Structures are given as C-alpha cells and as structure tokens.
Amino acid sequence: MVSQLRTYTINKGMMDSWLELFDKEIRPIHESLGIPIVATWVNADRTDFIWVRSFDSADEIPAKEAAYFASPGRKALGDIPTSHIAKMDVRLIEEVLAPLKVA
C-alpha cells in the first residue's frame, strides 16, 4: 500500500467552508471510488489542511484520480474546490514501521 500526504494551503478566511466542502462532498466521492481517506488535520494557524489518502499501489493512482475527476459528483463541484486552495503539495509516502500497540 502507498499513500499520498497532501497539504493544501487554504485561502484566508475559507477554512471553515473548505472543511464543510471536504466532509460533505469531496470525501464521499473519494470513498465511493475506493480511495480511502486515512486522516485529516488542520495546522494551528488554520492555514493548511493536511490529509492522507491511500492506494493499493502507485500504479493505480492515475486511474483512480481520473475516475475521481470524471465522476458526476466532482464535475458538479466545478471550480469550487480549487477556488479554496492557494497552494498544493502532494507527496507519495510508504509506511515503514507498524504502529505501536498500546497496552
């Protein structure tokens, strides 16, 4: 399994509307296409939205992303998601250590 660590700098004053959009529209589209959202965070300044989504392999990413952008739900959003985002950073990451089990 591989993941993408995605950091989006959200335009000033738009974090609340971004979080609502992500939760109600973007996340459900991803999950309906078999692209699990592993975790989401907001930095202390509430300027960056950080999230992780996972794939079975790096090879499947282009097809899954194409399916996402071609989906009726994403098409219906038009430029609303991108109007929130000032900057994007996407990194491909792999897990190297299993999580510790807390007793």
Image (spheres, rainbow, N blue to C red):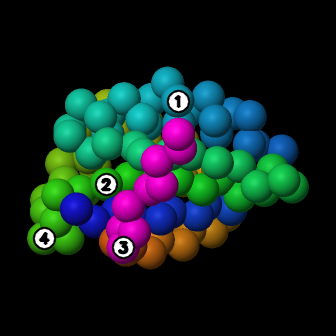
Q: Considering only vertical position in the picture, is 12 above or below 18?
A: below
Residue numbers of the magenta segment: 95-103
Q: Which residue is mark 3?
A: 96
Tell me, yes or no, if residue 75 can be seen here. Answer: no
Total count of labels: 4
What secondary structure is marked by label 1?
A: helix
Q: Which is nearer the eye, 39 or 69? A: 39
Q: Residue at x 29, y 34 (%)?
A: 31
- Number of other residues with Cα within 10 Å of mark 3, as a class: few under 14, some 14 to 19, many 20 or more: few
Amino acid type of the residue that numbered disc 1 sits on in the rendered structure: Asp
Marks 3,2: beta carbons within 8 A: no
- Number of other residues with Cα within 10 Å of mark 1, as a class: few under 14, some 14 to 19, many 20 or more: few
Q: Which residue is mark 4?
A: 59
In which quarter of the view is residue 48 placed?
bottom right
Mark pair 4, 1: CA separation: 27 Å
Q: Considering only vertical position in the picture, is 65 above or below 78?
A: below
Could you tell which of marks 2 and 1 lies nearer the N-terminus? 1
What secondary structure is marked by label 3?
A: loop
Q: Residue at x 36, y 73 (%)?
A: 96
Q: Which is nearer the eye, 102 or 83? A: 102
Q: Is residue 33 left or right of residue 50?
A: left
Could you tell which of marks 4 and 2 lies nearer the N-terminus? 2
100 magenta-colored: yes
Q: Which residue is mark 2?
A: 54
